[in-house]
Amino acid sequence: MKLSDIGEFGLIERFAPLFKHLIPEGLEGIGDDCAIIPINAEESLVITTDLLVEDVHFLKEHILPRELGWKSLAVSLSDIASMGATPVGSFLSIALPENIPVAWTDEFFNGYHDLSSKESTPLLGGDTTKSPDKIVVNVTVVGKILNKYIKRRSGAKPGDLIAVTGCLGDSAAGLKLILLDMAKEGVSSALARSHHMPVPHIKEGKWLSSLAEVHAMMDVSDGISSDLDHIMKASNCHAEVWLEKLPVSDHLTKVSLENGWDIYALATGGGEDYVLLLTIDKNMEQEIKNEFFKMFGKELYIIGEVKEGLPCVDWMLNDEKVDLCKGFNHFG
Ligand code: ADP
Ligand code: MG
C-alpha cells in the first residue's frame, strides 16, 4: 500500500489515535483547525501550524516574494479565524537555498510584515536554515479566545443552515490563470491576487464566534467539497448544498464563461479561498444575516442545510442531486 492509496486524511487517521492517550483532560488536539489549550476556566490558547513547500503550494517564478510572505501567514491566521479567536503572535520557520537573493528575502519579510501589521500579530520566533534546493515555509500562529466562544467543526446540528462569509472559486480560477500564463492584467490578475494574497476573515470569525446560534465553523482551505465533509464527519450529520446558491464573483463567472470552465467545480473543489464555512440556527437566519451585513458591509451567504443521516454531502442543482469531484487532498 502506498501513501497515495490512503491520502492525506487517511494518513492522519492512522497516526492520530496513537497519541490520544497522552492528551490530558481539557486539551483538544488533532482534528480541528486549531488545537485548544485551556489557560483557565475562562480562556484558552488556540494553536495552528501550516507548511508551504515550493512546487507543491507555490511556484517561485509565478509568485512575488512579498505575496508569498503575506500568504504564508494568511493561511495560518485563517485557522485562528475559524475558531473565532484573536491572534496573539506567529512563529516562522523557513528553509532557503543559499543562492537566493537577499532582496528576495527582504521582500518576503515585507509581505509577512504587511499582514502582521494589518492583524496586529507580532512575529515572536521561528527557525532559519539552509535548503539544498527548494523553499519551505512553516508558520505557527497562537491565538486567544474565551472558552464560551470557541467554535468547532463538531458543532453542526440537523436543521442548521450552512453559510459562507465570502465568494468561492476565485482562488482556484486565479491558479488556473497563473498556470496558463493568462494572469497578467484586469479580471485575470485580480483572480490571481485572490490566490496569492488571501485575506483571512479574522474579524468575521470573532464576531460570529460570539453568537450562540453559530454552531460549527471552519475555514475553506481545501474546497467546500472536502471541508464540509470534515464538518459532517465531526458532527455526525448529513448536508445538502444548493449549488445555485453558491456565491461566485463576477470575475469568476466571466473567466469561466470565456474559457469553458465548470464554475461549480471551481467553487466547490478548488480551495484556498480562506473564507469561513459555518452552520447557524435556522430560526436566527435573518437576524444573523442582517447584523453581518451591518458589521461587514457584505452578505453572509446561505448555501445549504444540515440534515440527519450519513456524514456526507448531497450536491443539489435546482432540486436535483448531482455528482461532484472532491476537494484537494495531498497524496490523494
Ligand atoms: P487545516 O487545513 O485546517 O490546516 P488540515 O486538514 O491540514 O487542517 O489538518 C487536519 C487536522 O490534522 C488538523 O487538526 C491538523 O492539526 C492535523 N494534522 C495534520 N497533519 C498533522 C501532522 N503531521 N501531525 C499532527 N497533526 C496533524
Ligand atoms: Mg483550516
Image: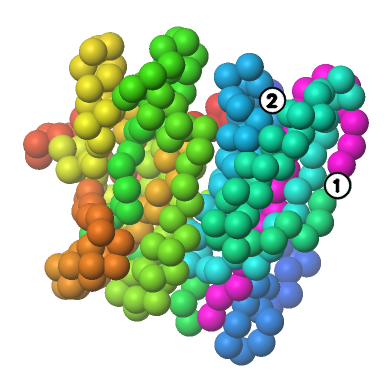
Label 1 residue SS: strand
Can you say whether 112 is above or below 124 in the image?
above
The answer to whether residue 102 is left or right of residue 297 is right
Mark 1 vs ligand 1: CB under 8 Å?
no
Across and down, in percent, residue 193 comes to 45, 32
Tell me the residue that label 2 is attached to: 54
Can you say whether 43 is above or below 314 in the image?
below
Residue 228 in view of the camera: yes
- Magenta stretch containing residue 201, yes or no? no
Instruction: Name the kind of residue labelled 2 in the image.
Output: Glu
Across and down, in percent, residue 4 comes to 62, 24
To which quarter of the image does residue 293 belong?
bottom left
The answer to whether marks 2 and 1 mark residues whose Cβ atoms lie closer than 8 Å is: no
Instruction: Name the kind of residue labelled 1 in the image.
Output: Asp
Tell me the residue that label 1 is attached to: 127
Near mark 2 (Cα within 10 A), the count class, few <14, some 14-19 or many ≥20, is few
Label 2 residue SS: loop
Please identify the quadrant where the N terminus is shown: top right
Q: What is the spatial separation of the Cα atoms under label 2 and label 1, in whole angstroms?
A: 18 Å
Across and down, in percent, residue 29 comes to 65, 62
Residue placed at 26% from the left, 20% from the top?
256
Residue 12 in view of the camera: no
**Residue range (magenta):** 128-147
Q: Earlier in the sequence, mark 2 or mark 1?
A: 2
Please identify the quadrant where the C terminus is shown: top right
Residue placed at 21% from the left, 17% from the top?
257
